[in-house]
Image (spheres, grey):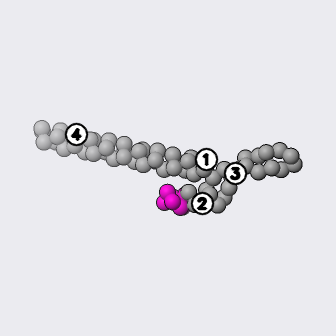
C-alpha cells in the first residue's frame, strides 16, 4: 500500500512541475510579444496630430528574433 501512495505522490509531483513549467513558458512568450508590440511602435504625423501606431517591420523583426513568428 505504501508503494501505491509513493507512486501517486510522485505522479502528482511530476504533474505539478509540468504545469508550473507550462505556465512559465506561456508567461515568457506573452512577455516577449508585449515587448515586441512596445518596440514596434512608431510615431507619425497625420492632419497636424502626432499619432502612435504599429510599425509592422520592427514588430515582425522582433517576433522573428524571439523565435515566435
Mark 3 against mark 2, which lies toward the viewer? 3
Label disc, if present, on residue 42 of the rendered structure: 3
- Number of numbered discs on residues: 4
Q: Which residues are magenta?
A: 63-69
The x, y position of residue 41, in whole percent, is: 66, 50
CB-based contact (under 8 Å), mark 3 and mark 4:
no
Name the side, left or right, on which 6 lies relative to 26: left
Q: Earlier in the sequence, mark 4 or mark 2?
A: 4
CA–CA distance between discs 3 and 1? Answer: 9 Å
Q: Residue at x 27, y 45 (%)?
A: 14
Q: Residue at x 27, y 41 (%)?
A: 12
Q: Nearer the viewer, residue 15 or 25?
A: 25
- Residue at image mark 1: 38
Q: Residue at x 55, y 50 (%)?
A: 33
Q: Earlier in the sequence, mark 3 or mark 4?
A: 4
CA–CA distance between discs 1 and 4? Answer: 43 Å
Label disc, if present, on residue 9 of the rendered structure: 4
CA–CA distance between discs 3 and 4? Answer: 52 Å
Q: Earlier in the sequence, mark 1 or mark 2?
A: 1
Secondary element under disc 1, as helix, strand or loop, is: helix
Amino acid at each position: 500500500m505504501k508503494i501505491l501512495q509513493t507512486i501517486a505522490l510522485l505522479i502528482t509531483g511530476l504533474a505539478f512541475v509540468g504545469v508550473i513549467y507550462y505556465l512559465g513558458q506561456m508567461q515568457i512568450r506573452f512577455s516577449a510579444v508585449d515587448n515586441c508590440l512596445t518596440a514596434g511602435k512608431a510615431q507619425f504625423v497625420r492632419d497636424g496630430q502626432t499619432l502612435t501606431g504599429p510599425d509592422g517591420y520592427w514588430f515582425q523583426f522582433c517576433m522573428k528574433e524571439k523565435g515566435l513568428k
